[in-house]
Image: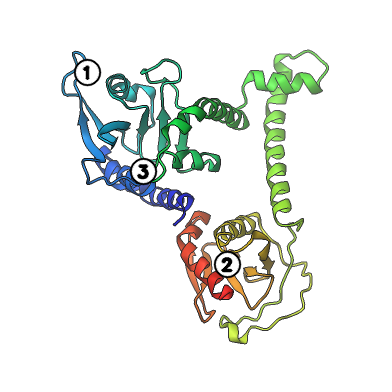
Amino acid sequence: MEFAELIRALALKVRNQREAIQTEEATKNAFIMPFISTILGYDVFNPLEVVPEFTADVGVKKGEKVDYAIMRDGEVQILIECKKSTEALKIEHASQLFRYFAVTNARIAVLTNGEIYQFYTDLDAPNRMDEKPFLVLDLMDIDETLIPELRKLTKEVFDLDSIINSAEELKYIGQIKRTIAAQFTEPEDDWIRFFTTRVYEGAFTQKVREQFTSLVAKSTKQFLNDQVNDRLKSALGGSNFSGASATESGVINSHDIVEVDLARDTEIETTLEELEGYQIVKAIACSEVKPQRVMHRDSKSYFAVLLDDNNRKPVARLHFNGKKQKYLGVFDAEKVETRHPIETLDEIYLFANDIRETIKSYQD
């Protein structure tokens, strides 16, 4: 799997198992150890790479432990402190990290509950861990822009200097983005006043504030939705959400599939969820072919992803029209479709190899 797909696969595991994980030890075994081994690439069973229950004497504090220390060339590089998945992370949980950061060679400290990973360094003062993280990875809401930075900490391409150099920018951009996101859900008075005073000429009274609170919240959400829709339309080559339809053979085996003339069908409605699913399939396929070769056609029964806009080259089918269960259709070497039930769009990444093999078969 590609690095981004490994992260999404772990995110899916966390989403599916989070309700069953109730203790810190279970969180370590189910979520954090797979993160260290699968995502960062370190051998959790090799004490030369990963030391569990790492101990170092810190002043008058004797025998305190940090959950994991990641080693490189005999030196501590990353410290990891774990909390159970049901517990929200707080800076108070990082007391051991603060102390150990000052007495080891570590430049990176991680506080995590298996779902959220907060990465710290020493931007504010040398050898003293910052109180605010420079990078926050939330597996339930992955920020794709952080994936290249996270990869710099993997065993394969460990590049500490590069990530430290970019840490300050990451820190402030992350904080600004989280602040903006918070305003979209619960706008603060300053945010409301900022927009109100630019469109309303009267005094900013309590009554005006109450009136514009809902208006600001509604308009910012609509603006965000418009931006998402515009980007999707642009990515799809200007196609609109009414969707282009394809008459459907109703037969899965491609030996019986024939080319048909396309016609607009007003009963066909392409949903945002189908377009998002298409973008995921397209992203997977782009490791094998140029993105412009991966096209889509919608029909009443399924949303088809095709290579070269050719019905004889099906890549995948999205069966999202059912009210309860969604299915992803993938194809074998004989172009016979197999439908797999999925709960979320992220699960499409679990079938990345099937999609790539299908693409390769057409290339051959």
Q: Which residue sits at x=49%, y=62%?
A: 352
Q: Which percent across, then down, holds residue 37?
A: 32, 47
CA neighbours of label 2 inside 10 A, class few (<14), some (14 to 19), many (20+): many
Q: Tell me the amino acid under the disc marked 1.
A: Val
Q: Tell me the amino acid under the disc marked 3.
A: Lys
Element marked by disc 2: strand
The quarter of the picture where residue 228 lies is: top right
On screen, 145 above or below 328? Answer: above
Element marked by disc 3: loop
Which numbered disc covers residue 175? none
Which numbered disc covers residue 319? 2
- The reply, left or right, for residue 138 in relation to residue 83 is right
Which numbered disc covers residue 58? 1
* Inter-mark Cα distance, 2 to 3: 39 Å
User: Would residue 79 be visible to someone looking at this image?
Assistant: no
Task: In the displayed orientation, state which residue is furthest to the right.
Answer: 201
Which numbered disc covers residue 155? 3
Q: Quadrant of the N terminus?
A: bottom left
Element marked by disc 1: loop
Earlier-in-chain disc, 1 versus 2: 1
Q: Which residue sits at x=49%, y=58%?
A: 349
Q: Which percent across, then down, holds residue 267?
A: 74, 67
Q: Are marks 3 and 1 in contact (CB under 8 Å)?
A: no
Residue toward you, 279 or 71: 71
Q: Which percent across, then down, holds residue 361?
A: 54, 75
The mark lying in front, picked from 2 and 3, is 3
Q: Which percent across, then down, holds residue 346?
A: 50, 54
Earlier-in-chain disc, 3 versus 1: 1
